[in-house]
Amino acid sequence: MQTNFTIAQLADPHVAESEKILRKCVHCGFCTATCPTYVTLGNELDSPRGRIYLIKDMLENGRPADKEIVTHIDRCLSCLACMTTCPSGVNYMHLVDHARAHIEKTYKRPLMNRLTRGVLAAVLPYPARFRAALKLARLGRPFANAFDAVPALKPFAAMLRLAPATVPAASATASPGTHVAKGKKNGRVAILTGCAQPVLEPGINEATVSLLNRLGIEVVVPKGEGCCGALVHHMGREDAALDQARQNVDAWTREIEQGGLDAIVITASGCGTTIKDYGFMLRLDPAYADKAARVSALAKDITEYLVTLDLPEPQRKPGLTVAYHSACSMQHGQKITRQPKDLLARAGFIVREPREGHLCCGSAGTYNIMQPEISARLRERKVKNIEATGAALVATGNIGCITQIASAANIPVIHTIKLLDWAYGGEKPAGLPAAPLLAAE
Ligand code: SF4
Ligand code: SF4
């Protein structure tokens, strides 16, 4: 694609980066076929190619964002299916991140939209606040239908509906400390505690720590870790995202320098995509660029890390049929496609892949709150495809997808690591259906 930026515009490193990305696009439109918003809405401006044109026009003309561009960029899920499809290697992720930061700086959103986004940014990344908000949401749930009647309050209705009926107690794996390896020590990793996941489903990191310890891996929860920054990053709040990234880089750098780390293990693929991008996000900060690149290189999804270990034979042969849902951040963001399925199959699960596996389930961070209608249509499509597999349960590696799919599916949705931990001798995940071989336990 031809671009017309001035020398002065290109002096801004963010513009220079976006120009490089724009020039790679050859307008072929292959990406439209796999874009969930184009597939759902059928509007070229809600396709990757359409959004690329809108962003190009805004940046080239040095214009502040307007209502039209904000509408179409806000509808983008950042699922990155377009990057998997694109034959020209267009880095849509970095382009849309830049566009969102530009929107945040130049566009004044309507009051309720600002308020909702402000509440999400102030609450979700902080586990104590999020826990308190979920308890409040339980009380507010009966008012969800009333909120739905007012368009500006729909996000609050979506929040109330997504809030779980009960909030589990906090886990020891969410506090700083070291979980020592059982038997001979084979390695040492840090684990990201994260923000929403340890509140909604503390059992995910508990299963991870338990399995890794049994495999001889010491797991450290470093002091000072926090939210990965993805949530505010996707809102265009660049300064806040970079602050959160720096805080984590500091925490993990201390561990790398003191005890050494083989990996930084992540159990939410949405966070993994962002942490693997820290090297790029902090490339312009001389104090952090190298440290961030080192952290990104060590970041591994738990399944990516597990396949590097010498796994024993599983202690159970579950014999359950599992529909594997690959989160967008797993398959498109991190290009991890094989490892979770291989691990599940090796552990004795029968793995089925739902049709249209490349399409997002509609969770996408806060998308299911901010864009509840599109999100609900995508969820419905996803659940239909999952249920058509005839599987007894769904396995996936991202808390956002678990919450989203579980809110509509009739079968349990369980994190992949909990199934693996159980197969290798750990605790049985709650809600696991009975299967012929389970009767023998
Ligand atoms: S990130 Fe997803 S929703 Fe956004 S343009 Fe790409 S394919 Fe479409
Ligand atoms: S597939 Fe790639 S090159 Fe083709 S229009 Fe989409 S982004 Fe551009």
Image: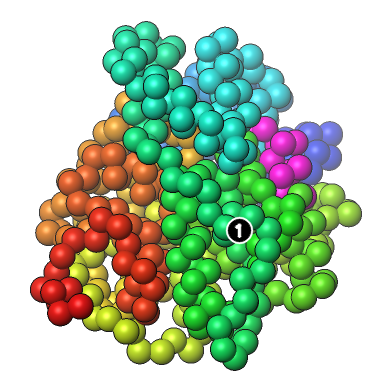
Quarter of the picture containing the N terminus is: top right
- Residue 71 position, x and y percent, is 48, 22
- The span shown in magenta is 234-246
Horizontally, residue 175 falls left or right of residue 385, namely right
Q: Secondary structure at mark 1?
A: loop
Q: Which residue is mark 1?
A: 192
Main SS class of the magenta portion in the image: helix
* Residue 330 in view: no
- Residue 140 position, x and y percent, is 39, 19
Q: Is the C-beta of the residue carrying label 1 under 8 Å from the nearest atom of ligand 1?
A: no
| Residue 177 quadrant | bottom right
Q: Residues within 10 Å of mark 1 (few under 14, many from 20)?
A: many
Residue at the spot x=77%, y=50% of the render? 246
* Residue 189 in view: yes
Question: What amino acid type should be assigned to the residue bearing mark 1?
Answer: Leu
Magenta stretch containing residue 243, yes or no? yes
| Residue 364 quadrant | top left
Residue at the spot x=43%, y=20% of the render? 156
